[in-house]
Image (spheres, rainbow, N blue to C red):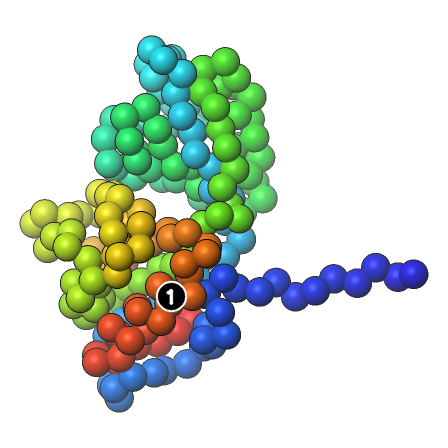
């Protein structure tokens, strides 16, 4: 019998369709939303007293300086985000970067445990001049550029859903990772919050 494959289903549900939605707007989209599919996400947890050795291995293999706090560093599709003392979220974008992540896991054997959580997280990128206004409706984190800048990261509830958020650039653009089981609810909240300003789904 020939093998058949089913199309991938987004955890954000059927609402994830390209187009313009909410209040009408001209020119630059006030808010742009895009799913970050096909990412590999891993939690990297240091063994007791091994953070220094891990940092050395990470820098030698990737050139990245391991964040000591809630910060994001990124190079050639590999991102490392501090989420807790001795713990980081590693994100690989693309096949070549996944191979780098595999090499990193080998190099850190005995120093850290690395668990793949790709199926348990759903990631969105949100950007635009009104994105902070939309996020402020359900997020108590101060996203003012004087308080939160590119490279900053945090773990905080957004719309009462546990969320990891990090800023990509000054547009501003953010990426948000939420539990896959709550992705549909998060999508409904985010699009409802963005409708006042108008938003584009890519």
Visible residue check, residue 29: no
Quarter residue 68 falls in: top left
In the displayed structure image, the side of residue 174 where residue 183 appears, left or right: right
Q: Position of residue 180 (x, y in %)?
A: 46, 55
In the rendered image of this protein, does residue 133 appear above or below residue 192?
above
In the rendered image of this protein, does residue 1 appear above or below residue 104?
below
- Where is the C terminus found, in terms of image quarters? bottom left
Residues packed near mark 1 inside 10 Å, few (<14), some (14 to 19) or many (20 plus) = some
Q: Position of residue 47 (x, y in %)?
A: 40, 16
Residue occupying the far bottom of the picture: 24
Which residue lies at the image location 56% right of the left edge and 21% below the top edge?
106
In the rendered image of this protein, does residue 102 appear above or below residue 36?
above
Q: Position of residue 35 (x, y in %)?
A: 44, 62
In the displayed structure image, the side of residue 57 where residue 118 appears, left or right: right
Which residue lies at the image location 46% right of the left edge and 72% below the top edge?
16
Visible residue check, residue 189: yes
In the rendered image of this protein, does residue 64 appear above or below residue 76?
above
Quarter residue 8 falls in: bottom right
Residue occupying the far right of the picture: 1
Residue beneath label 1, please? 185
- Where is the N terminus found, in terms of image quarters? bottom right
User: For the residue labelled by badge 1, is the local secondary structure a helix, a strand or a loop?
Assistant: helix
Query: Number of callouts in the render?
Result: 1
Q: Position of residue 160 (x, y in %)?
A: 26, 57
**Of 119 and 95, which appears nearest the observer?**
119
Which residue lies at the image location 38% right of the left edge and 66% below the top edge?
185
Which residue lies at the image location 20% right of the left edge and 62% below the top edge?
138
């Amino acid at each position: 019998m020939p093998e058949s494959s089913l199309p991938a289903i987004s955890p954000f549900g059927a609402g994830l369709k390209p187009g313009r939605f909410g209040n009408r707007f001209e020119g630059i989209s006030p808010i742009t939303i895009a799913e970050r599919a096909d990412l590999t996400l891993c939690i990297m947890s240091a063994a007791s007293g091994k953070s220094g050795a891990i940092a050395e291995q990470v820098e030698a293999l990737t050139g990245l300086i391991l964040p000591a706090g809630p910060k994001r560093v990124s190079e050639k599709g590999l991102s490392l985000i501090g989420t807790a003392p001795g713990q980081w979220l590693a994100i690989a974008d693309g096949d070549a970067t996944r191979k780098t992540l595999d090499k990193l896991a080998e190099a850190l054997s005995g120093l850290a445990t690395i668990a793949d959580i790709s199926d348990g997280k759903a990631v969105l990128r949100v950007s635009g001049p009104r994105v902070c206004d939309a996020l402020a409706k359900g997020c108590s984190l101060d996203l003012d550029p004087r308080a939160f800048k590119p490279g900053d990261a945090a773990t905080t509830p957004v719309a009462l859903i546990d969320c990891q958020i990090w800023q990509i650039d000054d547009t501003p653009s953010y990426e948000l990772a939420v539990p896959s089981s709550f992705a549909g609810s998060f999508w409904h909240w985010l699009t409802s919050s963005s409708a006042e300003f108008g938003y584009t789904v890519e």
